[in-house]
Amino acid sequence: MQFTTDHIYHIYNRGNNSQPIFFSTENYLFFLKKIRKHILPHADILAWCLMLNHFHLMVYVNSVEVFHEKEYPQVCFNYIHQNPVKSGLVKTPAEWEFSSYRDYVGLRDGKMINREKAAELGLKIS
């Protein structure tokens, strides 16, 4: 995938035939370490969620972008955070440990997301 500066991307992937890609807490933590190493130097993370058989990242590459479809970033932001609920894994997004939702609502002080950039773009938990 080729990235362009001043754009938001929804990066996601699923295991073959929807098979699991994370088998233990260590797998989740290893993947998060790789995100920090390979994505954070190039983009701000606005939202993320790691699921048993897939993952979602919402990233912003460099500076502010003017959107043609202004509602999509908020829709994507909400979709990522609601995914564990829609999948039936938890009743509320705050219950899912491997998501940036807890960081945004103050249940954890995660360092991977860029809260300031999300706020600048008008993204908020709804």
Image (tube, rainbow, N blue to C red):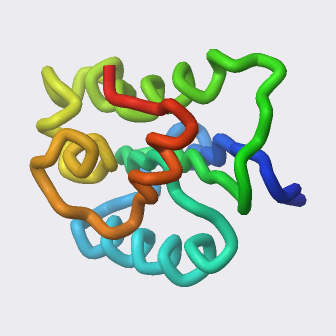
Where's the C terminus, which quadrant? top left
Q: Position of residue 41 (x, y in %)?
A: 62, 79
- Give the percent coordinates (x, y) of residue 19: 48, 45
Q: Is residue 1 visible?
A: no
Q: Is residue 3 left or right of residue 78?
A: right
Q: Is residue 82 left or right of residue 102?
A: right
In the image, residue 26 lies at what x, y percent? 27, 75
Task: Give the residue drawn at x 65%, y 52%.
Answer: 60
Q: Residue at x 52, y 45 (%)?
A: 56
Residue 122 visible at all: yes
Vertical side of 59 occupied by 25: above or below = below
The quarter of the picture where the N terminus appears is: bottom right
Q: Position of residue 29 (x, y in %)?
A: 31, 73
In this rendering, is residue 111 above or below 75? below
Check the image and name the residue furthest to the bottom.
37
Residue 124 in the figure: left or right of residue 79 = left
Which residue appears at 77% of the width and 47% of the height? 7
- Toward the front, the furthest residue is 120
- The total number of labels drawn is 0
**Most foreground residue, 51 or 16:** 51
What residue sits 19% from the left and 62% below the top? 109
Which image quadrant is residue 113 in? bottom left
